[in-house]
Amino acid sequence: MAKTTLDYEQLMNAVSLQVPYPPSLYLGDEMAAQETYMDAAQIRTQRLFRFEARVYDEDQLPNETWPLTNIYTFNKVINEVMQSQGGTDQQKRAILAEAKVGRALCHLYFLNDYSLPYNAATAATDLGIPLLTKADVTQTTFVRASVQECYDFIIKDLEDALPDLGPLVHRRKFSRMAAEFILGRVYLYMAKFNEARTHVDAAFAELGNATVPLALYDYNVVLDPDDSGTWFPDFGFGLSNYPLAANNTQVIYNLSMTNFQLPQANTFVYSPETAALFDPMDKRLLLFSDTEMFNPDKVFPLGMRRYSASLFSGLEIGPSLPDLYLMRSELKARAGDLSGAKSDLEILRAKRMPANIAAVPSGIAANKEALVRYILDERIREFATSGMRWLDMRRLSADPVYSNTVKYTHKLYDDAGNVVATYTLKPERFALKFGERMLAENKGLVEND
């Protein structure tokens, strides 16, 4: 029943992009699982971890349709706000621009769940997702566009929005910085590195315009239990002083993933191979626990750990400063600017570990391919168990040089650290299946292989 410009602004203010238990959380190759607790996990998460084709039973609708409700709101604003009452043209255009960024972001996440990774050679024929432009709850027919059409649609929404977006003033309000960041991420997924760099640089250029604090946290300080600015203590349910998303100075736009489910708190951990990527003095290890919840005397084998820092506020997976630095570092390295890549990477690492281990090893810093691989490993260290690795796996699986950085297996371990089962990811499972009920209720929707 929105009529005034203020009504549409309030509709946008009510948007909260929270991703409930995304599949990417259980699919990344940095993950492992504990046999003792596997039966306690939801059937859905068990199937995702095992890379099974069937995630849902015949009578179930998939969880991964969370973007659709938000796309409805964004479409309503996009289609109606310019005819609203009481606001100036500039106000209306700003609200319209924010809604276009939101619509693009939701389509991007929906696409990442239900399409194969972008491949320039096949994108014109690979099936993407339906492109939703109407706020119509009665619509029951949906035809999948191609992956190329989906990316073109997302890019157009973001580029159309840019001229009317303002500086970052609130972490749940789309800003020009957030839109530039998302465009950089989109082009990175497409392996269009020059275009990605243009928008990543533009996002950096917006840092000085923000009216809310933006800075990397120094984990040498906030993860020191004895420092006055510490995030500790931890009473067993996360770090009690961990910042809320609204106050998190690393967040550009608050897009959070809900990750804590009590019955499977001890089921999913990062793998021994992931553990080996960390220096023992890396402060990021303190965001994880090496012991079981409710059983602190039981240590996970082989260095495996569960995420434990912020159980109830979720993990940030949207536009953020750490990702911005890592994207620019990777793009610089790919372009041959090794000193620039090293500098960006060390800015982040200096905030994550003691100074004596923060420098990139000289032999790696002087070799383009070795440095890119090191940056990709840094992304695992920074975003382990957050679901972000799955998104990197998708794009890297089509990379002619770095596809071998993607591992296609998950392992299930017993209490002694023995592998009791191994599950293999088939390339077609980079796209989830919609399931029988989703297909039956939405005409024209074609299932993935």
Image (spheres, rainbow, N blue to C red):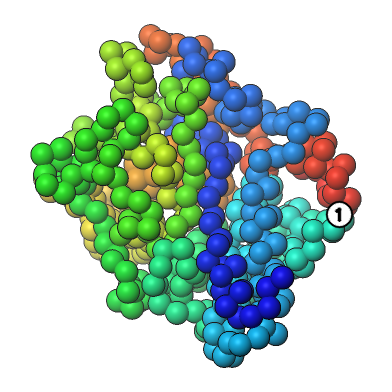
**Residue name at image x 46 percent, y 63 percent:** 172
- Which amino acid is tagged 1? Thr
**Residue name at image x 55 percent, y 62 percent:** 14
Q: Can you say which quadrant of the picture contains the N terminus?
A: bottom right
Q: Please state the horizontal and vertical placement of residue 122, each as a whole percent of the image.
A: 71, 56
Horizontal relation, residue 234 to residue 55: left or right:
left
Quadrant of res 40:
top right
Q: Is residue 11 above or below residue 64?
A: below
Q: Can you say which quadrant of the picture contains the C terminus?
A: top right
Q: Is residue 60 above or below residue 103?
A: above
Res 291 visible: yes
Q: Callout 1: helix, strand or loop? A: loop
Instruction: Residue lying at the far top in this picture: please name it.
Output: 416
**Residue name at image x 74 percent, y 38 percent:** 61
* Towards the viewer: 235 or 360: 235
Query: Which residue bears the numbered disc 1?
Result: 140
Q: Is residue 153 above or below residue 329?
A: below
* Towards the viewer: 250 or 373: 250
Q: Please state the horizontal and vertical placement of residue 112, each as a whole percent of the image.
A: 62, 50
Q: Please state the horizontal and vertical placement of residue 198, each as a whole percent of the image.
A: 45, 74
